[in-house]
Image: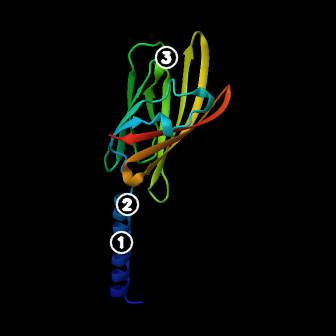
Amino acid sequence: MNMSFVKKLLAAVIVSSTLVSFSTKADRANFSGSWALNEGKSDFGERGARFATKALKVEQKDDAITISRTTPSFQGGDDVTTTETLGFDGKEVQGTGFGGSVRKSTLKWAADGQSLSISSTTTGERNGQSFTFSSTETWTLGDGGKSLTVTAVRSSQQGEVTTKAAYDKQ
């Protein structure tokens, strides 16, 4: 093979890979917006919607997503809003959860870019007892981006629970 052909082939491979990487990012679902819980379309099982996230505010950029969750307080009173920013690089992010607990989370996109999964482990102490639970949330858009379904599988010392929260875009 002559050197000119090898250079052209290498250039074609680089250009093709670059185009594929840009088109993959562009084809990702965009979860940005304000979302309100639709209890009628949700399924919380025996747990009920008592402590379900009532509202989500999501800001998605090219390299990360910031999620603000508004939930009822465990002690009653005012709602609590927590915010976390997760990178699309798969690196673990540590934040503070309810009652000073520590939450470690990672985000992973589905191969088709149309859904994402957030895996987290929360550890802490409540009433003198240590606790740990893990969860995996799968986020999927529907109705042309007007609805969001968050299916969560949570595991703790009490067992495993699966819930489905439906949100409407505001």
Can you identify the residue that label 2 sits on? Answer: 27
Residue neighbourhood size for the residue with mark 1, other residues' Cα within 10 Å, grouped as few (<14), some (14–19), many (≥20): few
**Mark number, residue 74:** 3
Disc 1 residue type (three-letter): Ile
Q: Amino acid at mark 3?
A: Phe
Distance, label 2 to label 3, CA atoms, is 39 Å
**Residue 113, image x, y percentages:** 44, 56
Question: Circle 2: is it few (<14), some (14-19), or many (20+) Cα within 10 Å?
Answer: few
Q: Can residue 41 be seen?
A: yes
**Element type where label 3 sits in the image:** loop
Q: Are marks 1 and 2 in contact (CB under 8 Å)?
A: no
According to the picture, the residue beneath numbered tag 1 turns out to be 14
For the N terminus, the image quarter is bottom left
Q: CA distance from mark 1 to mark 2?
A: 20 Å
| Residue 89: image location, x then y, percent | 42, 48
Q: Earlier in the sequence, mark 1 or mark 2?
A: 1
Residue 149: x and y, percent? 47, 44
